[in-house]
Image (tube, rainbow, N blue to C red):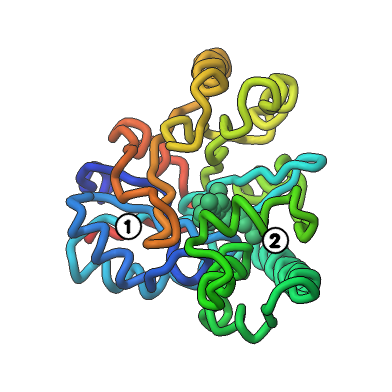
Amino acid sequence: MAGERRFRGPIDLHTHSSVSDGTESPSQLIRAAAAAGLGTVALTDHDSTAGWPEAARMAGEVGITLIRGMEFSTRERFTSVHLLAYLFDPSDAGIVAETARIRAARLTRAEQMVERIGADYELTWDDVLAQTTEGATVGRPHIADALVARGLVLTRSEAFAGILHWEAGYYQPHYAPDPLFAIRLVRAAGGVPVLAHPATRGLAHMLPEKRLAEMVEAGLFGLELEHRENEPAAKARLYELAAKYGLAVTGSSDYHGTGKPNRLGENTTSSEVLEQIIEQGTGTPPIYG
Ligand code: AMP
Ligand code: FE
Ligand code: FE
Ligand code: ZN
C-alpha cells in the first residue's frame, strides 16, 4: 500500500494535550515531540478527537508522523480501564455518541466532586473552569490544577495523593462503558484497540485471564506493557499472556506536558508493531509529516 513504511522512529503512541488533561495545546505537543527527537507520535486525548485537526497541521509543518488516536474511558466493575484506540473513523456514529456521553458524565462528576471539596476547602467550580480549555474532557487533573492555583497543594501529584484520592472521601466515579463494548466499537470504526497501562494495579488486582481472553475475542490488538506505571510482576505475567493470545506489545510515555513526570519517548513501540497498527487501522490514515 502506498505510504507504508514511510514513518520514522522513535515511536511514542500515547500522549495528551489540553484537549483533555495535558498542559500543552495539540500544536505545542507536536512541536515538543519533534524537539524530543521522536519520528512518530500518537495524540491520544481522553474521550475526544477534537485535537486531531490542529495536531495534523503541525505534524506536516514539523515533519513528524502522526497517528491519530484516543484514550477511551471504560469501566470494569469498580475499576477504571483505559483503552487506547488508533486510526479509527472519528465521525463513526457509535464513537461520537459514546464519547459525548462519557464527556458529559465526566463534567457532572467533576462538578459534584468540586461541590463536596468546596464544603471543606476554598475551591469553586469557576476555579476549575479557569484551568480548563473550552470543550476539554474534564477530569481530576483539572481539579488538581485548581487546587494548585488556590495554593492548597503544590502539585498535581500531591492533589492525587491527597484530596483527589478515592480514599479521601471526595472521589466519585463517572459513567464509562464496558471494555468489551468499547473494543467492538473501535474495531467497527476501523480502529485498533490497545489496553493502556494494564499492569498498574499489580498482580493481585490484575484483570483475570478469562476477561483478557474475552477482550481478545472482541478484537483487542495489544497491551501497553512498556509504561512507567506498570507494576513489574503484573507486567511479567501479561508478557506471558500476550504471547499466549498473540497480542502485540506497545511502549509509550503517556506524556501530559508538565502535568505528570512522564517524558516524551521514555518508552517506545517497535516499527513492526506500528506497521501492523497501520495495516489494521482503516478508519483514518496516518499523517506522514
Ligand atoms: P480521572 O479520569 O478524572 O479520574 O483522572 C485520572 C487521570 O488523572 C488519568 O488519566 C491520569 O492521566 C491523571 N493522573 C493520575 N494520577 C496523576 C498524578 N499523580 N499526577 C498527574 N496526573 C495524574
Ligand atoms: Fe490523563
Ligand atoms: Fe490512562
Ligand atoms: Zn493517558
Nearest-to-viewer mark from 2 and 1: 1
Tell me if 61 is positioned left or right of 199 in this view.
left
Which residue is drawn at the image coordinates 77% and 71% (left, top)? 120
* The one of 42 and 6 positioned closer to us in this rendering: 42
Q: Secondary structure at mark 2?
A: helix
Position of the C terminus, as image quadrant, is bottom left
Residue denoted by label 1: 66
Q: Which mark is residue 251?
A: none
Q: Are marks 2 and 1 in contact (CB under 8 Å)?
A: no
Quadrant hosting residue 216: top right
Amino acid at pointer 1: Leu
Tell me if 258 is positioned left or right of 243 in this view.
left
Spatial distance from mark 2 to mark 1, Cα to Cα? 24 Å
Residue 80 image offset from top left, x and y in percent: 70, 46
Q: Residues within 10 Å of mark 1 (few under 14, many from 20)?
A: many
Residue denoted by label 2: 94
Which residue is drawn at the image coordinates 49% and 37% (left, top)? 229
Residue 119 image offset from top left, x and y in percent: 80, 75
Amino acid at pointer 2: Gly
Residue 105 visible to the viewer: yes
* The one of 198 and 257 positioned closer to us in this rendering: 257
Residue 111 image offset from top left, x and y in percent: 75, 75
Q: Is residue 249 above or below residue 55?
A: above
Which residue is drawn at the image coordinates 48% and 64% (left, top)? 154
Q: Is residue 247 above or below residue 283?
A: above
Q: Residues within 10 Å of mark 2 (few under 14, many from 20)?
A: some
Q: Secondary structure at mark 1?
A: strand
Which residue is drawn at the image coordinates 27% and 44% (left, top)? 4
Say whether disc 2 or disc 1 marks the residue closer to the N-terminus.
1
